[in-house]
Amino acid sequence: MQPLRPADPSAIAGYRLLGRLGAGGMGVVYLARSAGGALAALKLIRAEHAADPGFRERFRREARVAERITGRWVVRVLGSDPEAREPWLATEFVPGPSLAEAVGVHGALPEPTVRALGARLADALTGMHEAGLVHRDVKPGNVLLALDGPRLIDFGIARSAGVTALTATDAMIGTPGFLAPEQARVTGAGEVGPPSDVFSLGCVLAYATTGRRPFGTGGVAAVVYRTVHEEPDLDDVPEALLPLVTACLAKDPADRPTAAEVRAALGPAEGPAEGPAGDWLPPGLPALIAERSARVLDLPVAEPTVLVPSAGPARTSPSRRRVLALGSAAAVAGAGGLTAWLVNRDRAPGGAGGSPTALPTYTIGVQTDLSGTRKADGRAQERGARLAVETFNARSDRPFGLAVKVRDDGGDPTRAAAVAREFVKDAAVMAVLGPTTRETVMAVADTYDKSRLVLATVAVGIDQGDISGQTSNPTYRELRVAHGMLQLPFNGLALARGAKRVAVVDDRAAGEYSWQTANSTKTTMSAAGETVTVHQMAATGEDFGPTVRDVIAARPDAVLYAGVSPRRAGLCAKALKQQGYGGMCGGVEYALGPEFLSVAGPAAEGWYFGTTYVDPALVPEAKAFTAAYRKRWGLSAAAPVERYAAEAYDAVTGLAESMRGLVSSQHLDVARVALRGAMRTFPYQGITKRYGFDERNVLNFTYIEELFLYRIERGVPRFLGQFEKAADDEKKRWKKQ
């Protein structure tokens, strides 16, 4: 919990505010105390969103639905006012951890605990279903653990059974990995009813007893595919619970038990009257809940907010014209700021950008590999970040100064963890531009998350579901299309070329990622009427010859290497050339590196790769950046700009603009938790591409078309542009040949 800020109210409709529980683009959730002393979680919606009639209607519906839910095992509504200028909704406050947090910290729960948990959640769902409501998002993150039992929360997407939702008709509602097959198919609102909640409850029970998601982790597409088409992983579910959990996870809704039947099968929901509170929980969790409760109960009542004149120089409120000018400046930050930097750099006083000392200064951390295997990518990120900070500081309208602090983790997880701890302890650091490898991200993500410190990456792609805590308000932000989509440029190109048969080399050295890429390609291309064959390459060997013989025997028009190793991609390319294959070949971003070119040699010629990064020298919108970058780092006019440099520039500039949005007219106040909220959807137009995340599922990068295509020509990767346009251009080129 964060303290109240000077601009926060001290009370709302009789509720005294004690602190901030969280903040996002839509509003703020406060910890509050009612006039009678009860603690509440009070959600306050920002006025600008309330001005949207559609948004207000959705909030009005949420309040109506929540008020109809009165069971013991749900958080109850204490008050609301959907018609206020800033609408608000107050619910009971539960100080305990979520089920996701409890399992993440303590591991799988014992069978008696899961039985009590399941019976009480089933009781909550029974009450909802009898009232004609469907929750639609039952998941571990929406189950809070109290000493007397669990509480089901978050009814923002709940609705009456059979009533059309206010979301788009093709929107997938729920959380992948815990939603029912009929929700994943999104074929109609009528299909999603009480049985969907029972399926989700089965997923929660399996997760609680095993510590694993029953349909695995990975990209959204892969998890959804397994949910719809494959059987769940129930290997470690206790034998006594297995038949019930299996029945809950039936693909056909008609084959599932009702919530009332689940409750009856698990035993009484109320539990014995005797026994101390918390006796349903395993050792360790009651103490955690008690500690949090004591900490909250000891909070003092906040005094009414009073504006006190500053002891320093008076700061006048900006005029309306000034506010509009600041907003307009944000839209031209990329080009205009660079022009100012180019003009003023050589005569700017006071160091980088000459930021005057009267302005506060916030720091952007850069954690990257400057001495390991990806040091070239790490250096590019550092250079791009430094240029972004210097460009921002050259702007006369900046409300604060920026600083940059760089730390080398060498691509080593142990060093990375130490670097993360350094940045977390430095209170001036508001966000960090992230590491270069999956392993280093996994080593640091939890450290940053616990400190509410945003970790933004441009050079790494992993499944965010593999990182705990990354749900509705994540701190880990991949500012790029999800890596489960990186095969799209190759697939689109193969279709444009008229390929009828595609072979995929599933390199088991890449683990689940290669399988997901192969499976996604098969699903996508098969739907277009193409024939796709998948050929596995053992993880332990480097002789691609036998696998390539199987590939060629399938007579493919195109071959996709689905692995992540540049070296192994090079070996695959050599084997294909040695065996006389002359068709289209390609891979994904991870396999495109210097080692691919050196190992493959002439066999690399003509290979295609889908990427999330551009060559800024060939992007008109990045012309000013390219000139500034070459000037800043002493490069010749023809020198290439390293990959990820422009993306790092975009990331830091976007972070700075998010921070600007947090600056009020009277106070310069940027905090880590507020920046995390501002980064929730991150709508930003950079010099390389558009950035943004889906408001309904903030783990989904909105602009999946922001992928690019490269072709190897004369031993060098050549940028072809956005992949759909590049595919059309390549099709025209082939017709001329």
Image (cartoon, helix red, strand yellow):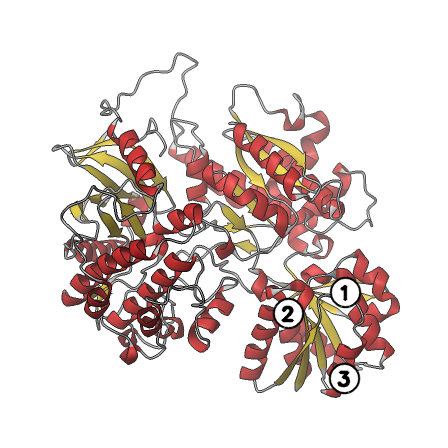
Q: In the figure, is residue 724 to the left or right of 49?
A: right
Identify the element where label 1 is drawn: helix
The residue at 81%/58% (across/down) is 595
Residue furthest to the left in view is 36
The residue carrying mark 1 is 568
Depth order, front residue of 472/52: 472
Label 1 sits on what residue type? Answer: Arg
Circle number at residue 489 = 2
Front position in the image: 627 or 188: 188
* Mark 1 in CB contact with mark 2 (< 8 angstroms): no
**Residue 109: horizontal and vertical position, in percent?**
37, 53
Image quarter where the C terminus lies is bottom right
Residue 272 percent location from the top left of the image: 16, 51
Q: Relative to 729, say whether 291 is above or below.
A: above
Give the camera-side residue of 415 and 580. 415
Q: Is residue 496 above or below residue 711?
A: below
Whichever of callouts 1 and 2 sits on the residue coming sooner in the sequence is 2
Q: Residues within 10 Å of mark 3 (few under 14, many from 20)?
A: some
Residue 308: which numbered mark, if any?
none
- Out of 276 and 76, give the one closest to the viewer: 276
240 versus 281 height, above or below: below
Amino acid type indicated by mark 2: Pro
